[in-house]
Image: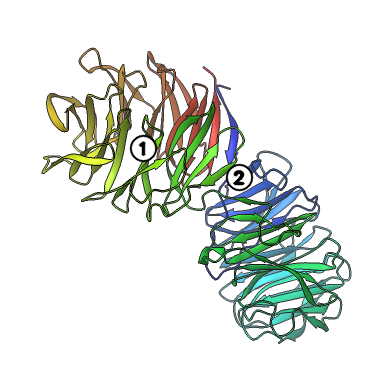
Amino acid sequence: MPYEAKHVFASLPQMQRGFSKVIGGDPKGNNFLYTNGKCVIIRNIENPAIADIYTEHAHQVIVAKYAPSGYYIASGDESGKIRIWDTTQKEHMLKYEYAPFGGKIKDIAWTEDSKRIAVVGEGREKFGAVFLWDSGSSVGGINGHSKLINSVDIKPSRPYRMITGSDDAFSVFHEGPPFKFVSTLRDHSQFVNCVRYSPNGDHFATAGADGQIHVYQGKTGEKVATLGGEKAHNGGIYAISWSPDSSQMISASGDKTVKLWDVGAGTAVSTFNMGTEVTAQQLGCLWQKDHLLSISLSGYINYLDKNNPDRPIRTIKGHSKSIHCLTVHKSDGRSYIYSGSHDGHINYWDAETGENDCFSGKGHSNQVTKMVTDGADDLVTCSMDDTLRFTNLNKKDYSASDVVKMDTQPKSVAAVAGGVSLAVSIEQIVLLKDKKKVFTLENLDYEPQVADIHPGGTTAAVGGNDGKIRLYSIEGNTLKLEDQMLNVSGLVTGLAYSNDGAYLASIDEKRAATLFTVADGYSVKNAFHGHHAKPVSLAWSPDNEHFATGGMDMLVFVWTISDEERRIKIQDPHRLHHISSLAWVDEHTLVTTSYDASIKQWTITY
């Protein structure tokens, strides 16, 4: 194969304020899983940089749970589809698909023999169903609720019992199979967000928006205790998870804390304070082997430290919203990938290990549209918040002074060594020197789309909506339009000079890539065709012999400049998501990103 996947840097969970996030655990204790958009993300709990992404759902996935056997995962989406798929093969073959009720699926539970599944959520006529995993045949009913059901769990030993928790503030106790209504538990005064059985099946607990946790006898449903007296937390509780020995429990709350409970004594052993910002609200948790995980509203995954409750052992960061731009920068012999997303968040990743973090301070407040590095260790970014930012890559914190306010929304930015940068915004082209505007072109007779500056720093190429590329000479602090205009097939969507300045490559909405030879008066060297839909990203390999394009057709091509027939086609690299940006780590390593909020690296062999 001319290409193979090298690394996957997965997205964070997709979070929503006021809604719990279910994290699934692998029965063998090696992996955990969660959802983002149409993806189910499986990560290694010891080394979360090892990840796998399942993307076969047509709608947003809400929850995914391992079967107790460990061989299958059931995932449910907002349309009411349940997919049961294989975990042992890389292809994750679909075993069965069901639609138990028409509406969003919020939680899933398996019986310990991996033969029956309970699903609950927001149906039209009913709010839950229990069925055989291999036929979909019903094995009872989930009754007794008048509003959507948030959570379900099944006793992990015979005789089976089932508990559900709903927005009607009730928990309902069922027995079976076939499962049938036994009793209603009315101890909560607000929504019941989470219900969970202990691993030994002796007890189950319910947690609600009223800040209370109640513990019940697992076989009879009789109430045993209320944790923490009147209130377990000062805010709503979104998730609980039992310890493997069934003696302790963690709870995640909107009061920005996670608490560790001694269930027998009914008291909190320790309180993990996760921060003061709204984004520090805790909406999910998982206790797996020795690992205690919680998920913040920000999407960050925290590994909690029992011995030091105020500081997590580690926090996994990344993106939870679609990524729109990428660039690569080398520092101290290591390559770092920088990525900017729809919510204004910028992250940086060690290209080899996947270790990542974000800049400190307050950055962009809206989508990051484009990013480049200049020769002075600055990351230059433009955003829909109408600003350009220059961020020092050694300090890695946002500077309040290095922000340039634009008159109109910037679409693209280019930069070269010597402090020269060029921004293309709606109806304007702006030249900047040393992080300050020095010249603005406006009242143009076309709409500029993208731009790049020749590595020599004396010429800028600007692609327009009229299928033309205009060349401007940079003379001191001014831009002067040159006589020559380059013609391409349609609106220019991407433009880049090769690293040695010998070539200019462009892509356009008519699905063509065009290569111009700079020294030969920008004559056309080659035109490349292969995309089925508009390409939107273009990146040159450091070898200056190849460049990559990616587009709305979910394809990436690596082209050879000397021969338009020699090309490498990467089919659907971000399954069911179109490519939003490309960059190269080295001449054999291509980085791709997409609206699935993940970053992938590919080894390319020519």
Question: Residue at 74% of width from left, 83% of height from top?
Answer: 229
Q: In the structure shown, which secondary structural element does the residue marked by tag 1 occupy?
A: strand
Q: Is residue 567 above or below residue 117?
A: above
CA separation in Å, label 1 and label 2: 24 Å
Report x, y in % for residue 515. Answer: 30, 21
Question: Residue at 60% of width from left, 41% of height from top?
Answer: 355
Choose the circle earlier in sequence order: 1 or 2.
Answer: 2
Count residues near mark 2 (Cα–Cα under 10 Å), then give few for <14, some for 14-19, many for 20+.
many
Q: Is residue 138 visible?
A: no
What residue sits right under mark 2 in the picture? Answer: 53
Instruction: Specify the quadrant that holds the N terminus.
Output: top right
- Name which quarter of the figure residue 352 lies in: top right
Q: Is residue 205 above or below residue 397?
A: below
Residue 55 located left or right of residue 442: right
Q: In the structure shown, which secondary structural element does the residue marked by tag 2 occupy?
A: strand
The amino acid on which the numbered mark 1 sits, given as a three-letter code, is Val
Question: Residue at 78% of width from left, 51% of height from top?
Answer: 29
The amino acid on which the numbered mark 2 sits, given as a three-letter code, is Ile
Residue 265 located left or right of residue 487: right
Number of labels in the image equals 2
Report x, y in % for residue 248. Answer: 81, 67
